[in-house]
Image (cartoon, grey):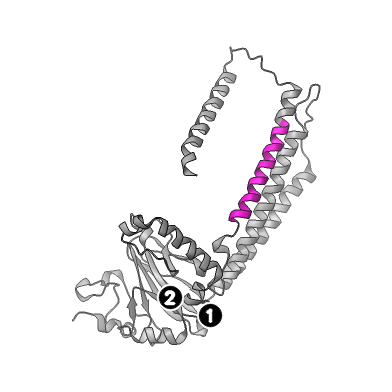
Amino acid sequence: MTSYLPILIVLFIAIAIWQMVKIFDLTQANVSNDQVATDKDNRINGYLMMGFLGFIYLITIISIYKWGDLPLLSNPASEHGSEIDNLMVISLLLIFFVQTVTQFLLHYFAFKYKGEKGRKALFYADNNKLEFIWTIIPVITLTGLILYGLYTWQSIMNIDEENDPIVVELYAQQFNWKARYAGSDNVLGQANVRLIDNDRANILGVDESDPNAQDDIITTELHLPVGKPVLFKMRSQDVLHSAYMPHFRAQMNCVPGMITQFGFTPTVTTEDMRQNPDMVDKVTNINKIRLEKKKEVEDKGQELRYEFDYLLLCNKICGKSHYNMQMKIIVETQDEYDAWLASQKTFANTLIK
C-alpha cells in the first residue's frame, strides 16, 4: 500500500497546480473567458456530487466493517473504564450522525439547485425559525455532552479516602518512571527535588528525616492488587510529563513543582487480560508480524516473542527518548501483591550510609 503513496502525492500536487493555474486565469481582468457552463455541464457536475457522496458513504461503510473494532473502546481494566468508553461511544455516534446528515444535505442541495438556464436564485434575508432550529439543537446536544462529561469526571476524581486506597507516588523524569509506595503506614514521606542525593542513593529527593518516609518502597515496576482502590500522587523532576495508562482509561499530567493526583480501581489481572480472546488475537497478530521481520527485531536487540503487559506511558513529547518512557504494570491478586511488597526493600534500607 505504501508503494502507491508517492504516486498519490504527485497526483495531488499536479491537481493542485492545475487548480491554481485555473484560478490565476480567472483573476486576469484583461483576459476574455468564453467558458460558460451549460445545463449539461451543471447536470454532470450535479451527478458527480451525488457520486462523490456515495463514494464517501461507501468508504465509511468499508472502514467500519474492516477497522471498526477500536481496541481502546473495549476491555477496560478499571471500574470507571466503562464510563469513559460510554462517553466516547456517544460522542462518536453523535459526530457520525451529524456528519452523515450534513454531508447528505450539502451534496443533495448542490444537485437539486444546480444551475439551469432561466433559473434565478431567490435571496432570503433571514429565517428566524430555521436559525432557531440550527442553533438550539447543537446547544442542547453540546450541553448534554458537557454535563455528562463533568458528571463522569467528578465520579472519577472524587476519590473516597475512607476506602483506604493504596497510596502510590509516580515520579517522572527524562526518560523513566519510578513508583514509591507508602509502606505499611500508607502515608508517603515528604519529598523535594532539592533533596536528591545520588551519593546516598536518594534518587527521588525523599526527606530522610521524615518518619513517614522510612517505610516507603521505591520500585521500577508498578504492582497493583485487583479490586483495590489506588490513589496516585504524581511528581515530575524536570519537564512536563503525562502519566497515561490506556487500558485503565487514566491520564494525568505530571507537573514540575507541584503534585497532581488520579485514582482508579483495577478490575482485571494481567493474567486474565492475557487470556481475553481479543487480546489473544492481537498478540497472535503482533507475533506473526514480528516473526516476518525476525532479523530487524533481533538486530534491535528485542525479544522476538511479544507478551501482553499493561504499561504506563508518557503522553507528552518530553524529549528525544519520549517514545521509550514506559513502566510495566502488573495487576495481580491481593496475596501475590502482598508477597511482592514484602520482598521489597524500604527506603531506609536502600540508603547508602
Tag nearer the camera, 1 or 2: 2
* Residue drawn at the location 48% of the way across and 82% of the way down: 165
Q: Quadrant of the C terminus?
A: bottom left
The answer to which of 167 and 298 lies nearer the viewer is: 298
Q: Residues within 10 Å of mark 2 (few under 14, many from 20)?
A: some
What element does badge 1 sit on? loop
Q: Is 339 situated left or right of 209 in this image?
A: right
* Residue drawn at the location 51% of the way across and 28% of the way down: 14
Q: Residues within 10 Å of mark 1 (few under 14, many from 20)?
A: few
Q: Position of residue 303 (x, y in %)?
A: 35, 64
**Magenta stretch, main secondary structure class:** helix
**Disc 2 marks which amino acid?**
Ile
* Residue drawn at the location 69% of the way across and 50% of the way down: 98
Find the magenta span and give its range.
46-67
* Residue drawn at the location 47% of the way across and 83% of the way down: 333
Q: Is residue 76 magenta?
A: no
- Relative to residue 250, is residue 212 depicted above or below? below
The image quarter containing residue 287 is bottom left
Q: Position of residue 146 (x, y in %)?
A: 63, 61
Q: Is residue 57 magenta?
A: yes
Nearest to N terminus: mark 1 or mark 2:
1
- Relative to residue 166, is residue 292 depicted above or below? above
Q: Position of residue 288 (x, y in %)?
A: 45, 60
User: Which residue matches tag 2?
Assistant: 330
- Which numbered marker is on residue 278? none
User: Which residue matches tag 1?
Assistant: 160
The image quarter containing residue 145 is bottom right
Q: Position of residue 121 (x, y in %)?
A: 78, 28
